[in-house]
Every structure is written in C-alpha cells, then in structure tokens.
Image: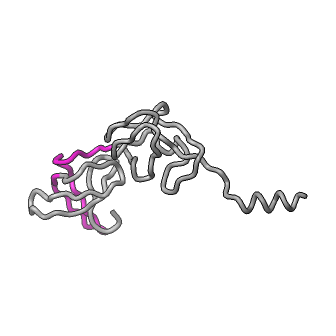
Amino acid sequence: MRWVLLLLCLASPAPADTVVATRTIRALEVLGPGDLALRPETLPGTLTEPAQAIGLEARVTLYAGRPVGIGDVGPPGIVNRNQIVPLAYSLGALEIRAEGRALARGGVGDVIRVMNLSSRSTVSGRIADDGSVHVGPGS
C-alpha cells in the first residue's frame, strides 16, 4: 500500500501557487504586502511567493487577478531616463571617469545604455548602488 502511495506522489506534479496582483498596479510602483496574493495553480515563468516581489518595482502594469511574471518586476529605479550619471570604467590600475546621459530608466544591477557627454558615443553599463554606471569588463 505504501508503494502505491509513493508512486502516486511521484507521478503527479507537486501543486504550487502563483502570485497574482490584488489590484491594478501601475508601472513604476513599488510593491507592498497588500498588493499580492497567491492563487493555487502552477504557471511557468511566474512568481511563486509574494516575498519574491515585495519591495520591487512593477516594470509593466499589473492587472488585478492576473499572474505576476518574473520579468514583470525588478529593483526600484534609481536612475531615470535623461538623467546625468557618472560613468566609470576600470581595468586593473586604469580608471576612467566621465559624465553620461542615461538613455533608459533602471535599478541597481540593471544594464542600461548611456551616452558619454564628452565623446557622444553610446555605451552599455551596469547601474551600481551609488547610481553610477560601470562600463567595461566585469560590469
């Protein structure tokens, strides 16, 4: 009898929950505990725990009752589009600093494009905790 139960448990997928929005949440709003709920269903590419999204920012409009996808939320933006940001490039002992204009909005760890104000060239870099954008290897 135990073997039959074990086989049944192994044959059927474990049920999981999907995170859904409790209200319509506009893009750029930071999510709080009351904004999310669990629905008992399994959908690929969606969040499974509200804690995964609390404190993050909605990147798109989230509609009430609809699942919240992994790419629908991200770190709160600290750099806005058209904002002047410090650019930093470092390789070993070499360090170059310049000013740039952010061409997109992003949060810590996001990769955005930035126009170097001196050379007018466009580079991609990762946003650091202090709001600077690091370009080059390791960024």
If the image is split into quadrants, where does the C terminus sit? bottom left
Specify the segment rendered in magenta: 77-101
Quarter of the rendering containing residue 4: bottom right
Judged from this view, the residue extending furthest toward the right is 1
- In front here: 125 or 35? 35
State the residue at coordinates (30%, 58%).
Answer: 111
Q: Is residue 3 above or below residue 48?
A: below
Residue 17: horizontal and vertical position, in percent? 58, 46
38, above or below 72, in the image: above
Is 79 in the magenta? yes
- Residue at image position (45%, 52%) is 70
Say if the magenta span includes residue 82.
yes
Prevailing secondary structure of the magenta residues: strand
Q: Residue visible at 46% across and 39% down?
A: 65
Residue sitting nearer the eye, 21 or 96: 21
Front-lying residue, 49 or 102: 49
Q: Residue 117, percent across and down?
A: 10, 56
Position of 52 with respect to 96 (left or right) is right
Could you say which quadrant of the image residue 7 lies in?
bottom right
Side of 118 relative to 52 (left or right): left
42 versus 57 height, above or below: below
Front-lying residue, 12 or 30: 12
